[in-house]
Amino acid sequence: MTVQALAILVLLGSFGIMILLRFPIAYAVGLSSVFCLLVQGLNLSEVCRLMVKGISSFSLMAVPFFITMGVLMGSGGISEKLIALADSLVGWMRGGLAMVNIVASYFFGGISGSASADTASIGPILIPMMVDQGYDDDFSTAVTITSSCEGLLVPPSHNMVIYATTAGGVSVGSLFLAGYLPGALLALSLMVGSYIISVKRQYPKGSPFSIVNFINQLFKSIWALAAIVIVVIGVVFGWFTATESAAIAVIYSLFVSVFIYKGLNWRGVWNSLGDCVNTLSIVLILIATSQVFGFCLTTLHVPDLAATAITNLTDNPIILAILLNLILLFLGCIMDMAPIILIATPILLPIATSIGIDPIQFGIIMVLNCGIGLLTPPVGAVLFIGSAVSKVPIERLVKATLPFYLCMIIALMLITFVPEISLFIPSLFAK
């Protein structure tokens, strides 16, 4: 066996074993990289150099700002405002509270950019409300966790920043714009599924639609929704970079949460910042160790070998696109979102571009696949958060989520094979 083959075996084998043993993902990535470098006889000082290089990126500075913005806005009393806005818009339908849940997640996702934050913030409010009005608890929770994935697609999403940095040469602004229609498509598919189930189970309708009530709720929510405008419009029109817009959004979200909605006092702000540090430390350690892992993959030519192996199976672009989705869905079952983006992008993006998938479109495909992974055991973080919030056992929750998995897969296939869904809005703003 050659040194290259042995190094690849050690890198991927040790990583897989540590994942199965439930090592923290950052440790698994870092240790497998160290073992690989030892096999190749390389100096371990490379580990330190690469880790520092991995997080020494101006564009990555946007990540902590977006995380901070999401935590501040999520803790600042905006959830109730967005739920009321969604209720005024779609609450009149059969299964109205399910529709409210889905639309509120679309709005809230544009604030938090996190499926976990969405579930943890909206779930404790809407799930009990739905159960009190006659909805089954497992259905209510399934709607909440699946709709939370809309927040991964609707900007600002720090995962899109991580993808743009990893892919290289991909515009963060274009990625932000690309997420709106796929997010809306996902919401629509979940609403159709919810409506069918609601009609079958005779779930209740809400109050009739009132344009006056909708306008009133829109004005009450305008301060929260304006944060999205600050970030997206500013980046798209080049007024400031993604990092600068994120920093401005943090100051804005602090002002709105403390002085406008008054959902946070200064003690609450301090506690929120503590939550941000905890989340950010995990993300940055992972980015740093993934840089070493990526170096090993590149020097061992693993992306080229993987591309050759996959393309040797077939030259049919449709089958190759389905294979890429299956690989990402499988990875989502065993890994969290950020490591998948950091590790799989250098391997799979060249294959995607070779069959005509635009890097921006592939970013949306990857994010949605990873979002579905957040709902699948054994590493489905959002699945476990939803179970903890609602007290519904995992087994019942997975069974209740099955129809919504189908809705999400349908949306994923449309996004994969209809590029215009992702690329239409960015093309309008292309210079």
Image (spheres, rainbow, N blue to C red):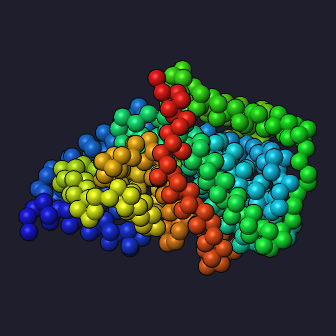
Residue farthest top in this picture: 239
Position of residue 216 in the picture relative to residue 338 (left or right): right
Of residues 104 and 387, which is closer to you in this image?
A: 104
Horizontal side of 316 relative to 198 (left or right) equals left
x, y percentage for residue 373? 50, 63
Residue 24 in sight in this render? no
Rendered location of residue 268, percent (x, y): 70, 44
Q: Splitting the image into 4 quarters, where does residue 170 fall?
A: top left
Residue pictured at 69% horizontal, 45% vertical: 107
391 in relation to 25, above or below: below
Establish if 17 lies above or below 371: below
Q: Residue at x 67, y 48 (%)?
A: 106
* Residue 147: image location, x then y, percent: 65, 57
Decide: is 346 above or below 123: above
Residue 402 appears in the picture as rendered: yes
Q: Quadrant of the N terminus?
A: bottom left
Q: Is 101 displayed left or right of 151 in the figure?
A: right
- The image shows residue 152 at horizontal and vertical percentages of 56, 49
Of 385 and 85, nearer the camera is: 85
Number of marks in picture: 0
Residue 68's image quarter? top right
